[in-house]
Image (spheres, rainbow, N blue to C red):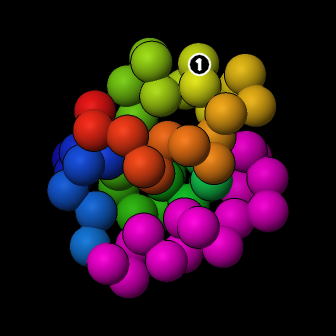
């Protein structure tokens, strides 16, 4: 499975276009991206929009 830090520019654009945390999680599943526990916690905690700017 792909890692969050290995997203292509196209995948990053799709992730930035997500309007909710659920959209982001569904996109990750569709793209085969494995989210870590820390990333899932950030998403659940409302900081999902910052996930794409972090180095995991």
Name which residue lies at 20% across and 56% down: 6
- Magenta part of the protein: which range? 9-23
Up/down of 11 relative to 6, above or below: below
Q: Between residue 55 and residue 21, name the one nearer to us.
A: 55
Residue that label 1 marks: 41
* In the depicted structure, whether residue 26 falls above or below residue 15: above
Secondary element under disc 1, as helix, strand or loop, is: helix
Residue at the bottom extreme, as displayed: 10
Q: Where does residue 29 sit, x and y in percent of width and height? A: 49, 52
Question: Does residue 45 appear to the left or right of 37 in the view shown?
Answer: right
Density class for disc 1 (Cα within 10 Å; few <14, some 14-19, many ≥20) is few
- The residue located at (49%, 42%) in the rendering is 51
> Would you place residue 6 above or below residue 42 in this image?
below
Q: Residue 3: x percent and y percent?
A: 23, 45
Residue 8 lies left or right of residue 40; in this view the side is left
What's the residue at 28%, 33% (across, down)?
Answer: 56
């Amino acid at each position: 499975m792909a890692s969050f830090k290995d997203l292509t520019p196209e995948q990053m654009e799709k992730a930035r276009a997500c309007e909710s945390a659920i959209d982001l999680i569904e996109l990750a599943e569709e793209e085969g991206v494995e989210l870590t526990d820390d990333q899932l916690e950030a998403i659940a905690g409302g900081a999902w929009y910052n996930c794409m700017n972090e180095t995991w």
